[in-house]
Image (cartoon, rainbow, N blue to C red):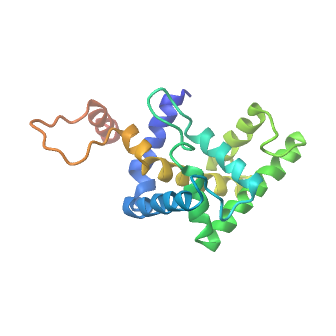
Amino acid sequence: MSEQSRREILRNIAFGATLAAMPAADAQHVHQEVSDAKARTGGTYKPKLFNEHEYATVKLLSETIIPADEVSGSAVEAGAPEFIDLIGSSNEDMATLLTGGLAWLDREMERRAGKDFLSAAGGERTALLDQIAFKKNATPELRPGIAFFDQFRRLVADAFYTSPIGVKDVGYVGNKGMTKFEVPASAIAYAVKRSGL
């Protein structure tokens, strides 16, 4: 799967499910809190929930989920790690899911490759993430990783597509008058395909 098509999939997730779960206004408050926290510490963000190793893993996962492309920045540049840390530090259940999921990633990678997730080779990390990316792969051993990665991807998409970088990536130009509106061909094709015609 190409990076562009994966970005398109994540963009659709953001429009459909993710933003419906977290209102854009709420996400903007989280982004503002991140900005305020950076301002208080001279431009660097100090994680509230994650230790150094966990935060490095969050950064790597965020970059893996939405990497930079030739048009826009990555999830890390959009502030996804900070966003996720702030969300997790504000909710005990989310904190448990996130820190538990990161620990699960390390334990599972150690079982498979003899090293933690960060120390593993790119192909080893990708193989594990490919397994936990799909609910159809659920086994008792993988179920905790699948639950974690599902939520983590949603948080990354929330963070990215509510940031200035993500809004630019979507092409949103704000409320502007239009002399003519044309339904995008892709939307028509999608509707026709879904209708069974």
Residue ranking furthest to the right: 114
Total tally of numbered discs in the picture:
0
Q: Position of residue 117 (x, y in %)?
A: 78, 44
Residue at 43% from the left image edge and 42% from the top image edge: 165
Percent across and percent down for residue 28 are 41, 59
- On screen, residue 31 versus residue 88, left or right, reads left
Quadrant assignment, res 125: top right
Q: Residue at x 70, y 36 (%)?
A: 126
Q: Residue furthest left?
A: 179
Q: Return the x and y of residue 36 as percentages of the image width and height.
A: 50, 61
Quarter-of-image position of residue 131: top right
Asked if residue 69 can be seen in this view, the reply is yes
Quadrant the C terminus occupies: top left
Q: Is residue 28 left or right of residue 52?
A: left
Image point 29% across, 39% down: which residue?
191
Task: Please give the name of the residue rendered at 54% of the width and 42% of the height, measured from the top-left corner.
Answer: 77
Q: Residue furthest front?
A: 42
Drawn side of residue 109 relative to residue 168, left or right: right
Q: Position of residue 50 (x, y in %)?
A: 70, 60
Question: Is 72 placed above or below 165 here?
Answer: above
Which quadrant does the N terminus fall into? top right
- Identify which residue, 54 or 4, lies in the foreground: 54
Residue 133 shows in this picture: no
